[in-house]
C-alpha cells in the first residue's frame, strides 16, 4: 500500500467527488408538490421583489476573502483553476512553487500565492520560513565548542609537523582547538631539518616545542634524529612523537575512500604515486598528487575518520605545548 501525503488527500472531503452515485440502483422518487416535482421550485421565491441587494457586504466574495496559509508538508488544498486537490509534498522558495499529490499518487506543481482553497475557503499559500541551521556543539576533534571566544594571542610554544599534508590534516581536525589555545602549527620540509629547527627555536620555559614525525618506528632514520633532539640541551621543553605510517595519508581510515585497506606499494615506487596508481587516480606530476590529497582530505569529517595511532599523538602534543 502506498504511503505518503496522498493518503491525507484520500480522506479529505475536498478531494472526494460530490456527484451522486449513478449506479446505486435506488430509484429516486419525487413527491407531488415538492421542489423536486416542480423541477424549478427550489429556485422560486414568494417575495416578488426579493431581498435588498445593497444590504450587507455585497463586495465580499461568495467564499469569503483570502487569508494567508503556510504550505506545510501534508496540508490538503485545492487549486481552483484545475480543481486539482492534494496534499503538499514540497515547496521551492527559489522557484516560488508548491508540489501537490492527490489521492491517486499523481503530482502537480503550482505557483505559490492565491488561487487555492483550504477547507472550502480561499487562501494565499506561502512557503514555510527557513529555519536557522543548528549550531555545532562539538569541534571536529570532539571537543566542546567554545562560543564567542576572543582570539587569543599566539603562544610562544609551537607544534611542527612533517610536511604540508600533515599540517592541513591537523588544521582540519584540530584547528578550532588550536586557535582557542593560541597554538600555531608550522611544517618541516623534512625530518632532516629537525636539529637545526630546534636550535633556531631555542625551547625553554614557556616556549615548548612539539614535533610530529612521519614513520617514527624503532631503527628508522626518523627515530635516530628524534633521539638526538630529545637528548640535547633542550630536552625538557621538546617532545617528538610520531605515527607508524609511511605517509600521513594512511592515517585516514581506508573505509572513507571505499577501501578495505590501504594498498601495499613496492619500495621501488614512490609511495604516493603507487597509491594513486593502485586506486586508478592520475599520478603523472605534483598537480595530480595534490589533487589526490585534496580528495583524501575531503573525505575527513572529524576525528572519527582518523586512525587512533595519529589521534593520540596529536592530543599529546597539544597537551605538551599548552601545559
Image: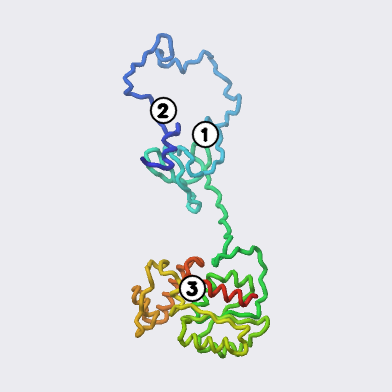
Distance from label 1 to label 3 (Cα)?
66 Å
Residue 190 seen in render: no
* Residue carrying label 3: 309
Q: Quadrant of residue 247?
A: bottom left
308 left or right of 200?
A: left
Q: Residue at x 57, y 55 (%)?
A: 132
* Residue carrying label 1: 121
Q: Residue 16 location, x and y as percent? A: 41, 32
* Residue carrying label 2: 18
Color theme of the render: rainbow
Residues at marks 1 and 3 touching, judged by CB atoms closer than 8 Å: no
Q: Which residue is drawn at 49% across and 54% down?
A: 94
Relative depth, front residue between 34 and 100: 100
> Where is the N terminus found, in terms of image quarters?
top left
Task: Say whether disc 2 or disc 3 marks the residue closer to the N-terminus.
Answer: 2
> Where is the C terminus found, in terms of image quarters?
bottom right
User: Against 111, is 154 above or below?
Assistant: below
User: Against 189, is 50 above or below?
Assistant: above
Q: Callout 3: 10 Å neighbours few (<14), some, many (20+)?
A: few
Amino acid at each position: 500500500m502506498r504511503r505518503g501525503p496522498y493518503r491525507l488527500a484520500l480522506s479529505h472531503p475536498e478531494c472526494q467527488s460530490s456527484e451522486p452515485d449513478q449506479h446505486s440502483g435506488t430509484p429516486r422518487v419525487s413527491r407531488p408538490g415538492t421542489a423536486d416535482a416542480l423541477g424549478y421550485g427550489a429556485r422560486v421565491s414568494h417575495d416578488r421583489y426579493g431581498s435588498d441587494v445593497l444590504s450587507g457586504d455585497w463586495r465580499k466574495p461568495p467564499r469569503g476573502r483570502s487569508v494567508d496559509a503556510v504550505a506545510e508538508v501534508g496540508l490538503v488544498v485545492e487549486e481552483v483553476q484545475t480543481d486539482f486537490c492534494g496534499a503538499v509534498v514540497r515547496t521551492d522558495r527559489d522557484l516560488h512553487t508548491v508540489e501537490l499529490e492527490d489521492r491517486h499518487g499523481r503530482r502537480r506543481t503550482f505557483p505559490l500565492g492565491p488561487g487555492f482553497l483550504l477547507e472550502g475557503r480561499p487562501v494565499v499559500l506561502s512557503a514555510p520560513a527557513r529555519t536557522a541551521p543548528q549550531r555545532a556543539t562539538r569541534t571536529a576533534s570532539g571537543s566542546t565548542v567554545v562560543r564567542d571566544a576572543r582570539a587569543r594571542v599566539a603562544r610562544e610554544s609551537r607544534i611542527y609537523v612533517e610536511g604540508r599534508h600533515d599540517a592541513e590534516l591537523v588544521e582540519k581536525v584540530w584547528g578550532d582547538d588550536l586557535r582557542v589555545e593560541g597554538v600555531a602549527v608550522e611544517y618541516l620540509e623534512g625530518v632532516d631539518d629537525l636539529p637545526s629547527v630546534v636550535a633556531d627555536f631555542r625551547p625553554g620555559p614557556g616556549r615548548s616545542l612539539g614535533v610530529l614525525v612521519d614513520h617514527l618506528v624503532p631503527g628508522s632514520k626518523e627515530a635516530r634524529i628524534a633521539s638526538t633532539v630529545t637528548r640535547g640541551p633542550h630536552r625538557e621543553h621538546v617532545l617528538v612523537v610520531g605515527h607508524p605510517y609511511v605517509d600521513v595519508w594512511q592515517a585516514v581510515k581506508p573505509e572513507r575512500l571505499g577501501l578495505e585497506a590501504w594498498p601495499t606499494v613496492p619500495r621501488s615506487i614512490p609511495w604516493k604515486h603507487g597509491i594513486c596508481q593502485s586506486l586508478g587516480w592520475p599520478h603523472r606530476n605534483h598537480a595530480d598528487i595534490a589533487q589526490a590529497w585534496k580528495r583524501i582530505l575531503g573525505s575527513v569529517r572529524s576525528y572519527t575518520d582518523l586512525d587512533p595511532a595519529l589521534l593520540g599523538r596529536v592530543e599529546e602534543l597539544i597537551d605538551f605545548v599548552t601545559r
